[in-house]
Amino acid sequence: MDFDLSQTTPQQAYSLLNGLVVPRPIAWITTLDLHGKVNAAPFSAYNYVGTDPPLVAIGVGNRPGPAIVGKDTAQNIRNTREFVINIVTEELGQAMNLCGIEFPPGVDELAIAGLETEPSKLVAVPRIRRSPASLECREVTTMEIGRSRVILGQVVSVYVRDEFVDPTGPYIRADQMHTIGRMNGLGNYVRTRDAFFQIPRETYQEWQKKRGTA
């Protein structure tokens, strides 16, 4: 089947993209409002998009309804210019899911999920204590396109629990962290536990040698 997205509804486009752009990492974002209250919410329209400088991008839609009102996360980032991305593991999946409920403004999602925070190193926004790693970010720019926002943030500091760092790189022991990823929009996720496999990347010279054309 072919789908002309100019002829589909936003919900239909969401269903198609959500089911095809998979698996997606989850940005469990903590922010502060202007009164210093912590907000936590997960977003799976997320990835890193650069390393010099280190950049991440997050897609954040508006609140449901006809008015153009950004979600708390987007408003907080615009007001304070800072946020923290907390890594989601299997053991944190249920708590993360609770934070995805569309609570009214001012509700403490982390308290409902039974989670505590601890101070970050370079930004005022705290990180989630039980998360094994976090990225401290400062907003570079926010692009508003239709009813969507794309937030670009520069990663200014990275926290990783010692057990998940190979200091020779440093490399992340990702196969031991047991993160989860988002699949389609039907509450489906994917585990990374025991799911790693390797496809070594070849150089052009190696490819030529294998074909006998070197």
Image: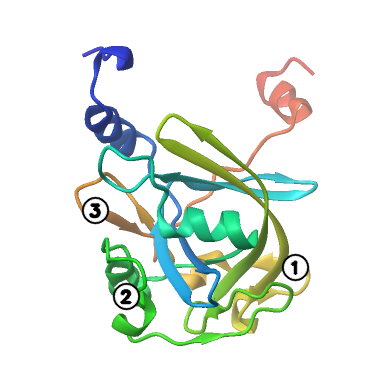
Locate residue 168, reporting x and y percent: 78, 70
Locate residue 198, reporting x and y percent: 53, 49
What residue does disc 1 label?
170
Q: Which numbered mark, 3 or 1, is in the foreground of this view?
A: 3
Quarter of the image containing the C terminus?
top right
Locate residue 180, reporting x and y percent: 39, 62
Of callouts 3 and 1, which one flags the residue occurring earlier in the amino acid sequence? 1
Disc 1 marks a residue whose amino acid type is Pro
Residue drawn 24% across and 19% down? 8
Q: Tell me the SS state at disc 1.
A: loop
Locate residue 146, reporting x and y percent: 43, 29
| Among the 4 quarters of the image, the one containing residue 190 | bottom left
Between residue 22 and residue 140, name the one nearer to us: 140
Disc 3 marks a residue whose amino acid type is Asn
Dot 2: within a 10 Å radius of its alpha carbon, few (fewer than 14), some, or many (20 or more) residues?
some
Residue drawn 49% across and 77% down? 37
Of callouts 2 and 1, which one flags the residue occurring earlier in the amino acid sequence? 2
What residue does disc 2 label?
95
Residue drawn 38% across and 40% down? 68
Between residue 66 and residue 96, name the one nearer to us: 66
Disc 2 marks a residue whose amino acid type is Ala
Contact? badges 2 and 1 (CB < 8 Å): no
Of callouts 2 and 3, which one flags the residue occurring earlier in the amino acid sequence? 2
Between residue 64 and residue 54, name the one nearer to us: 64
Position of 204 compared to 108: left or right?
Answer: right
